Amino acid sequence: MANIQQQFLSELSDALSTDRKLNTCDREVQNYVDIQKDRLRKKDLLLDYEFTPRGHNPEGREMGREAKDEHYVAKMWTGTTKYTRLLQKNGKRINKKKMNANVWSVVINYLNGQNMGDEIYNCPNCGNPEKIKALTEGCPYCGTSFKMDELYPKVTAYNIVEDYSKEKKEMLKFYLIVSAITFGVLLVLVPILAVIFGGLGAVVMFMLKADPEAIMHMIMLPAGAVAYGIFTAPFMSLFIGGMILFGKLLIGAAKSAPLLATFASHQKFEEELKKYGQDYMQEYFMSQTVAKMKSAIYSEDARELPFYEGEALPSEMKDIVDVFFRGAMDFKSVDVKNDVAYVSADVYTEVLRESNGKARESERIFHVNMRKNLSKKNDLAFSISKFMCPTCGVSFNAYKHKNCPACGNAYKMEDADWVIDSIK
């Protein structure tokens, strides 16, 4: 899995502005990227991401947090990067965002670390043995569809969180810039002001017939100001630079404080899930929820998606062209009735909107209601198993189609995964 996060970010840089596919991510990420590209295309927009490795962890590394089932393991990865997003309309830039960031990814691999693509799997429908890698598009004998339509390792979820810290080289560059500005102000602006006020003062003192020695002191004021500037500039640079960094940290802390407070709600949610034998990895659950939410927001009609069971989304969401997840989700309520969990959560984001050639970015909290049948074991969506219509028994790809193509009945996605009832 070495450098898989960097491979994914490299692919993501081109995914929205070209026809390039994401080979290192799973189906859910690819699905919402494709839906987002459709919205951008219909609005005649070009959106580019750029990730440049930076800092102490540019290649990404495993964080030690993981979740497992009997075949696969999901691990957290993180890495530091410079993130740039550029939005263009008809070749004209209408929005640009640059920041230092931490990228958090969930990477799934086979539990034993070996590629299982050549292992034999017996189709549960027709019984024919076949290599797993041949089943990604369905059983070649009977057409049965499976949940597992890719071979791992894969990035199955990611989010980007702004990094307010600075590395040594960034800190040095920052202080050099601050020092240059400080020297410029102290060695240029201060003497100019001293010449102006010193000259005016000398004229006034001469007209008032002041002591010649006092007039000479006033005339020498610019020279003293230059000497003062040379002496104090290094200390002023450190002071001003420190105050700027401190101010940025305060602003970052103020923006992050509401987000940090949300993580306490995850413990209650995790404890409730464990009562029903459900696995839970905080980052994975948040990212998968955000992936579904993004797909619904970018889609022409969210009601056509298999994991969305709510009403049509408000028309104002049609202007949203990018959703930046801020890395926090706050569970407002968790209620379990008849083994079905009903969850209400706030998702903290920044959204980029475009309307009539004008773009604007703003913070937004989406209120999401979800549900899932907890009596069904959660396989983290990466175990191979059959999709089958519970009414007529026909197998079909329920990730892409809500209704069975044979009988028209809807597949109960909450039996296999979380579904969204509303987004506000």
Image (cartoon, rainbow, N blue to C red):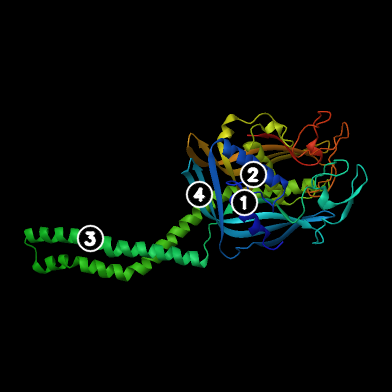
Residue type (three-letter) at the residue carrying disc 3: Ile
Q: Are marks 4 and 1 in contact (CB under 8 Å)?
A: no
Task: Identify the residue position indicated by label 2 in the image.
Answer: 33
Judged by depth in the image, the label closer to the viewer, 1 or 3, is 1
* Mark 2 / mark 1, whichever is N-terminal: 1
Residue 81: quadrant of the picture: bottom right
Does 241 sit left or right of 87 as displayed? left
Query: Quarter holding the C terminus?
Result: top right
Kindly report the distance in space between the C-alpha atoms of the residues bearing marks 2 and 1.
9 Å
| Number of numbered callouts drawn | 4
Q: Residues within 10 Å of mark 3 (few under 14, many from 20)?
A: some
* Mark 3 / mark 2, whichever is N-terminal: 2
Q: Are marks 2 and 1 in contact (CB under 8 Å)?
A: yes
Residue type (three-letter) at the residue carrying disc 4: Lys
Task: Identify the residue position indicated by label 4 in the image.
Answer: 97
Kindly report the distance in space between the C-alpha atoms of the residues bearing marks 4 and 2.
19 Å
Mark 3: which secondary structure?
Answer: helix
Query: Quarter holding the N terminus?
Result: bottom right
Task: Identify the residue position indicated by label 1 in the image.
Answer: 12
Task: Identify the residue position indicated by label 3 in the image.
Answer: 192
* Mark 4 / mark 3, whichever is N-terminal: 4
